[in-house]
Image (cartoon, rainbow, N blue to C red):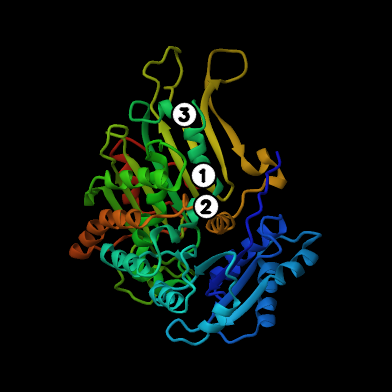
Amino acid sequence: MVSRVIPVEPFDLVLFGATGDLARRKILPGLFHRYEVGQVPEEARIIGSARTDMNPDDFKADVRAAIEEFTPDTPSRPAVLDRFLGCLDYVSVDAMSDAGWAALNDRLRPDVVRAFYLSVGPSLFAGIAEQLEKHGMATPDARIVVEKPFGRNLETARDLNASLRKFFQEHQIYRIDHYLGKETVQNLMALRFANSLFEPLWNATHIDHVQITVAESLGIEGREAYYDHSGAMRDMVQNHLVQLLCLTAMEPPSKFTPNAVRDEKVKVIEALDPVASTDIARGQYRALEGEDGYLDHVGDPQSRTESFIAMKVRIANWRWAGVPFYLRTGKRLRARVSEIMVQFRDPPHTIFPNVEPVHGNKLIIRLQPDEGITLRTTIKDPGPGGFRLAEVPLDMSFAEALGADSRPQDAYERLVMDVIRGDQTLFMRGDEVEAAWAWADPIIEGWERTRDRPFPYDQGSSGPEEALMLMHRDGRRWRQIGG
């Protein structure tokens, strides 16, 4: 199978924070790959911008080094890379003053799509948006892209949304969550709404529970100041895991348009029940011999910030009444893996004598590291000598099923192209962000009132014992991380 590449129209993309880590690792290599496959046209311009004082040639040399480091080598890359670098420019600007903004405006063309990607801290969002409007760059068809975190709580999220809306309309604001750009996340919608097999079963009658896991084998090194101020709840649950929950649980939209899809996601968030403290387990990875723990990394032995969280969430609507959704994320766990596991109910009656109990099917949607979908089914164990049952996987790895030419795009590749196309389907709307914070705030405020410490857990484990008990007391078990 060969994917079809549809080129976008010529555009001017201004990348603020162009010398930062995210730009070098993800955004610029992603743009290069889209250029390499013919989706970014020769007439496109990518204008790097930051406070760093450098000339365009120095910026191009830096981008060349980043692409050589973070993209796979191909025989044609040197010639293609030279042409791609010809699309690049650089202008130094200061978000807190007028320095450089007139020069940036002079680089923009009036007759092409223009997008402003703010790969900077949230504290600079409002200032950059104001400067864009002040210098006449915030035209009615311009787009502005902002990275998470979208606030620290409901109040700050509302303030941030209000600041952006002073200068841009909601349809111009693209709040990027890279998890929504993953191929498998979008295939979750295709799996549900483009196949008649699963959707009739996608409800409380047939599904026992759902597990959503985002596990990291790395710690917080390099992000200590940010992470200790945020924790797993703010960094992962309130945005990434809630988004995965929404796509798993939402009703079919009336049509596949940005607002129709996002309307259904908001309904899921608004239907979330408050989470009892007994349905939450927080953890911190502890030091091992020769390995520093979380408290060592942040340099604060009194820190109560969680590096792990597991919780049981319920959705108060007809489709999901009585079906628990178990969310789990953490640092320094057994393996790096992100997946959604849908556990179907056990068959109501077993007709086979003298066999082990038959368990319900499992549908596993793998987001990383190897994107794909597995359906675990029960079959007869081959061979003579009695009737035995075995559970086997029907496994589809995207890399194997679609071939090397159709490798899944990096999330940033797809999302940046969606910005240029003006497609907001995979971006969060302002009311969606605020609804997620309205659900998360009482949970966080409860921890701050009690000042309970997170439970310690071993590095390389599946988290604290309390997270296992969260499932065991319901008669269920977590799917093994990396299993």
Q: Position of residue 363 (x, y in %)?
A: 48, 34
Three-letter amino acid code of the residue under disc 1: Gln
Residue under the point 57% across and 69% down: 110
- In-image side of 126 versus 317 (left or right): right
Q: Height in image: 403 above or below 379? A: below
User: Against 140, is 270 above or below?
Assistant: above
What amino acid is labelled 3 in the image?
Phe
Circle 1 sits in a helix, a strand or a loop, which is it?
Answer: helix
The answer to whether one can see residue 483 in this image is: no
**Residue located beneath label 1 in the image:** 186
Locate residue 472: give its quadrant: top left
Q: Residue at x 47, y 65 (%)?
A: 144
**Figure check: 75 above or below 379:** below
**Could you tell whether 103 is left or right of 311 in the image?**
right
Disc ID at residue 425:
none
Q: CA distance from mark 3 to mark 1?
A: 16 Å
- Is 99 on the left-hand or right-hand side of 431? right
Residue 471: x, y in percent? 33, 42
Q: What is the spatial separation of the Cα atoms under label 2 and label 3, in whole angstroms?
A: 23 Å
- Of the residues under marks 2 and 1, which one precedes in the sequence? 2
In the rendered structure, which amino acid carries the disc numbered 2? Gly
Q: Name the N-terminal-most of marks 2 and 3.
A: 2
Q: Nearer the viewer, residue 314 or 168?
A: 168
**Mark 3 lies on residue:** 198
Q: Which residue is mark 2?
A: 181
Q: Are marks 2 and 1 in contact (CB under 8 Å)?
A: yes
Q: Is residue 437 visible?
A: yes
What count of labels does the image hold? 3
- Is disc 3 surrounded by few (<14), some (14 to 19) or many (20+) residues within 10 Å? few
The quarter holding residue 79 reads bottom right
